[in-house]
Amino acid sequence: MAHSEHHKERNSLAGLLERNVEVHAQKCYQCGKCSAGCPVAEEMDLPPSMVMRLLQTEEAANDEKILRSHSIWLCVTCEMCLSRCPMEIDIPSMMDFLRQRSRSEKKVHKKARNIIAFHKSFLNSIKWTGRLYELGLILDYKRQSLNLTQDISLAPKMISRGKLHLFPGIIKGKAQVARIFKKTSI
Ligand code: SF4
Ligand code: SF4
C-alpha cells in the first residue's frame, strides 16, 4: 500500500506546486524568517510562513483557505522571503502560481478585485510610457476599479515609502517595451 501511495499523484496544492514551480512545501521548517522580512506581512491574513504550514497539511480545507486568502494578492514579488529562506524556497513563484489557481478556480478574495485592477493599470502604464508613470497609474487604477470616491489603501502607503514617484518618465527602451506588449498581446 505504501508503494501505491507513493505513486499516487497528489492533487493537493503542495503536490501541484511541486510539479509546476518546483516549490517543496515540506522542506519548510517554520523558522519564520520569510514572514519577518516580508514588507506586507502585517496586512496579510496568512503570512508566507503560515501559507507554507497550511500547504504541509495537504488538507482540502486548508488549500481552500489559501486560494481564498487576501495574502496571495498582497504579495509584491519583492523576493525578500526567498533571499532570507534557509531552504531557498521560492515563495514569490509560489504566490504567482497560487494567484493563477485562485483566478482559474474563481476563488479570488473580494478585496483582491482592486488589486487585479491595479495590476492591469500597472501593465497599461508600462505599455504607454515605457515605464511606470505613477500618477497616471493611480488615476487609471481608479478608473479600472471604478473606485473613484473611496481612497486606495495601497497607493498612499507606497508613495510615503518612496516606492511611487509622481512624475512620468520615458525610458529609452520604449520601443522594445512596445514590441514585448505586441508579442504577448497584453
Ligand atoms: S515576495 Fe511576497 S511574500 Fe515574499 S517577502 Fe515579498 S511580498 Fe512578502
Ligand atoms: S523562511 Fe523558509 S524555512 Fe523559514 S518559515 Fe519561511 S519558507 Fe519556511
Image (spheres, grey):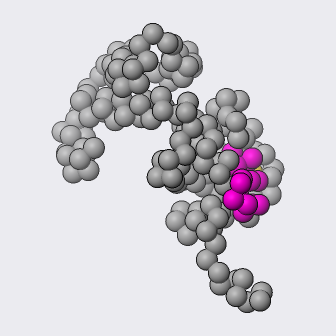
- Where is the N terminus found, in terms of image quarters? bottom right
Q: Name the residue: 78% across, 46% down.
A: 32
Left/right of residue 69 with respect to residue 122 in the rendered view = right
Q: Is any part of residue 84 visible from this angle?
A: no
Name above or below for residue 151 compared with residue 32. Answer: above
Taking the magenta stretch, the answer to whether it contains residue 10 is no
Q: Is any part of residue 117 visible from this angle?
A: yes
Left/right of residue 158 with respect to residue 165 in the rendered view = right
Name above or below for residue 53 compared with residue 23. Answer: above
Image label count: 0
How far from the left and from the top, in percent, is residue 169? 29, 22
165 or 20, nearer to the observer: 20
Range of residues picked out in magenta: 48-62
Q: Quadrant of residue 146?
A: top left
149 or 129, nearer to the observer: 149
Taking the magenta stretch, the answer to whether it contains residue 50 is yes
Q: Name the residue: 80% across, 57% down.
A: 29
Left/right of residue 53 with respect to residue 66 in the rendered view = right
Q: Name the residue: 46% across, 21% down.
A: 164
- Where is the C terminus found, in terms of image quarters? top left
How far from the left and from the top, in percent, is residue 53? 76, 53
How far from the left and from the top, in percent, is residue 21? 54, 62
How far from the left and from the top, in percent, is residue 69? 63, 41
Q: Quadrant of residue 56?
A: bottom right
Name above or below for residue 119 compared with residue 107. Answer: above
Magenta stretch mostly in which secondary structure?
helix
Left/right of residue 97 with respect to residue 41 in the rendered view = left
Name above or below for residue 115 compared with residue 86. Answer: above
Q: Name the residue: 72% across, 83% down.
A: 5
